[in-house]
Structure formats: C-alpha cells, structure tokens
C-alpha cells in the first residue's frame, strides 16, 4: 500500500454530503466537480488514517461545526463557480 492510499481528508466526505444536500436538477458532473474543488480549497485539511479513529475521537460539537463549515463552503463555491463558468 502506498502512503497516498493510507490517508484521507475527512472534509471530502462532508463536502460530498453538502453537495448532495444542495443538489439541483440542472447541476452537471463538471459543475459539481468544480464546486467540490473550490469548497475543499476553502476548508482546512483534516486528515486521518482510519475512519473509526476519526469518528471515535471527534466530539459531537466539532463534527456539527465541521458539517456547517462544509455546507457554507459548498454554498459559496456554488456561487463562485456559477459566476466564473467558462462558456
């Protein structure tokens, strides 16, 4: 196993959940990929090796705050990507 496969960024999962929660019928895969990139660039990295470790050591209030930050970042990213789309 390579080191690249040994770690993940917890915010990726949260941003995907936020994208799903804000999904619109007109969203394309390219648009959502851009939204995800922009949103993740606005959030800090939160890396872990094992999902169980992240869930065990993460306080409920901290998880709630991370979810709120992810949703806010996705909403801002949607606006940004919409305003800067290539035609």
Image (spheres, rainbow, N blue to C red):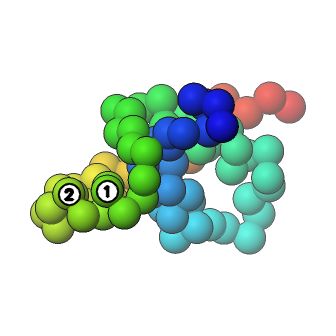
Dot 1: what SS?
helix
Residue 2: % across, % down = 64, 31
Residue 59: % across, % down = 15, 61
Residue toward you, 73 or 50: 50
Residue 21: % across, % down = 52, 70
- For the image, the number of numbered tags is 2
Relative vertical location of residue 57 with respect to residue 79 in this rendering, above or below: below
Residue 40: % across, % down = 49, 37
Q: Is residue 73 at least partly visible in the picture?
A: no
Tell me the residue that label 1 is attached to. Answer: 53
Residue toward you, 86 or 44: 44
Which residue is at the far right?
87
What is the number of the mark on residue 57?
A: 2
Q: Disc 1 and disc 2: Cα gap in Å? A: 6 Å
Tags 1 and 2 touching, CB below 8 Å: yes
Dot 2: what SS?
helix
Residue occupying image coordinates x 59% and y 44%: 36
Relative vertical location of residue 2 with respect to residue 55 in this rendering, above or below: above
Residue occupying image coordinates x 54% and y 39%: 6
77 to the left or right of 85:
left
54 to the left or right of 1:
left
Mark 2 closeness class: few <14, some 14–19, many ≥20 residues within 10 Å: few
Q: Quadrant of the N terminus?
A: top right
Residue 68 sits in quarter: bottom left
12 to the left or right of 48:
right
Q: Is residue 20 at least partly visible in the picture?
A: yes
Residue occupying image coordinates x 69% and y 50%: 32
Residue 24 sits in quarter: bottom right
Relative vertical location of residue 9 with respect to residue 54 in this rendering, above or below: above
Residue occupying image coordinates x 24% and y 64%: 56
């Amino acid at each position: 196993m390579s080191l690249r496969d040994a770690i993940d960024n917890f915010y990726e999962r949260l941003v995907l959940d936020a994208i799903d929660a804000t999904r619109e019928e007109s969203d394309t895969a390219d648009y959502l990929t851009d939204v995800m990139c922009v949103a993740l660039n606005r959030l800090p990295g939160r890396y872990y090796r094992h999902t169980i470790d992240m869930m065990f050591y993460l306080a409920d209030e901290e998880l709630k705050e991370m979810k709120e930050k992810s949703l806010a970042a996705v909403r801002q990213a949607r606006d940004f990507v919409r305003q800067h789309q290539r035609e």
